[in-house]
Amino acid sequence: MLEELLQALDADRPVAWCRLVETRGSTPQKAGATMLVFETGAQAGTLGGGCVEAEVKRKALAALHEQRAEIARFQLDSDYGWDDGLICGGRMLVLIQPVQRGSSAENYFRRFQESIAAGEGVTEIVRFDEKSGLPVPAQWLVDGGGRLIANLPESGAIPTDALQQLKALASRPRAYVAHGFSYLPHLSRCPLLIVGGGHVGQAVGNLAADLDFDVWVVDDRAEYVSPERFPKAERRLAGRFEDLLPSLEITPDTYCLIVTRGHNHDELALYHLVERGARYVGMIGSKRKIRLIMDDLRQEGISSAALDAVFAPVGIDIGSQTVPEIAVSICAELVAHRNCEGVVPRRWPDDVVAGGPE
């Protein structure tokens, strides 16, 4: 959405950035949802409801004409949604920010896009409560350390109480509201290191890239990490696992998935990754294979705590059988772990064999 907004500005097309900053009760979208409204009446993105979107569009066109930001409030009752069956009963607050070329708002969004493109996590703080006395909504864009990157209006300092309520991006928080401030985190993309470029690795890699993971793939066979097999991968590395894996940077945001072609390769990969501080380590295979690997690695001196934290067999139980189904199962687990603070539903029961050797 940021890229589309900036493309419009480069073409000298005014546009309104419409961001859902707070929801209460049942609503079709949650805080963080974004829609762009162009001066022609065209739109991009969605706020989740036809009648509400039509009213947001009307207000956005007026805001573009007046060049004045506002917070629009919507109560999802009989006033909005009767014709579309969208009577959810909740409340939505939408920030409508007009942006035109050469404006201070353009500078804000260009700084915003630069931070995202650099892979940096940022948080938008929006003050919208009636008690603030502000004539228009105030916005601050801050980095992971709470340092100011950009703000609207440009002269507005960050209130101390806004910073006191700021959650660390390292905990990967979702959007939240606290005492008149809306916090909209934009989290950095997580690297996903896939060890094994076979059928499952390929299917997971291509799907995970669309799910906002930066995919790295490693295999000891160069033909299995080709651009043709992994067109969306950020990095493709061919070589012996024992040579490549120890030298790769593993951060607290890194996800590691082991899906090699055999028991010995899986064990070798897990040996080099399990105690490196990754956010997630998962390994495909049967319960028996996993148990044998874990027993071997304990004898090699790997801690039981590290091995117990491995997600194995990998994937959410959806009864998957085919390679595409297994990839969906694995990617669902990766997304759940990333988005839900490490909580993954529907793990495999003890009596089920999941996946298998690549």
Image (spheres, rainbow, N blue to C red):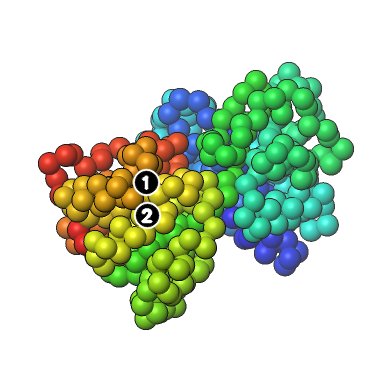
The three-letter code of the residue at mark 1 reads: Ile
**Residue drawn at (76%, 39%) of the image:** 147
Residue 258, image x and y in percent?
A: 34, 58
Give the amino acid type for the residue marked by disc 2 in the picture: Tyr
Q: Residue at x 68, y 53 (%)?
A: 115
- Tell me the number on the disc at residue 104: none
Q: Secondary structure at mark 1?
A: loop
Indicate the position of residue 259 as horizontal and vertical percent values: 31, 61
The vertical placement of 131 against 167, above or below, is: above
Q: Which mark is drawn over residue 302?
A: 1
- Other-residue count near label 2 (Cα within 10 Å), few / some / many at <14 / 14–19 / ≥20: many
Front-most of residues 148 and 33: 148
Q: Position of residue 343 (x, y in %)?
A: 38, 36
Secondary structure under tag 2 reads: helix
Q: How many marks?
A: 2
105 lies left or right of 267: right
Q: Earlier in the sequence, mark 1 or mark 2?
A: 2
- Residue most extreme to the top: 131
Viewed as shown, does residue 318 lie left or right of 167? left
Name the residue nearer the viewer: 264 or 133. 264
Q: Quick check: 95 above or below 287? A: above
- Identify which residue, 256 or 242, lies in the foreground: 242
- Which residue is found at the position 82% from the left and 52% from the top? 103
Q: Is residue 164 left or right of residue 238?
A: right
For the N terminus, give its image quadrant: bottom right
Q: Are marks 1 and 2 in contact (CB under 8 Å)?
A: yes
Residue 38 in sight: no
Residue on which the image places disc 2: 271
Q: Name the residue: 41% across, 66% down.
A: 242
The answer to whether residue 293 shows anywhere in this view is yes
Of residue 36 and residue 132, the one placed in the foreground of this image is 132
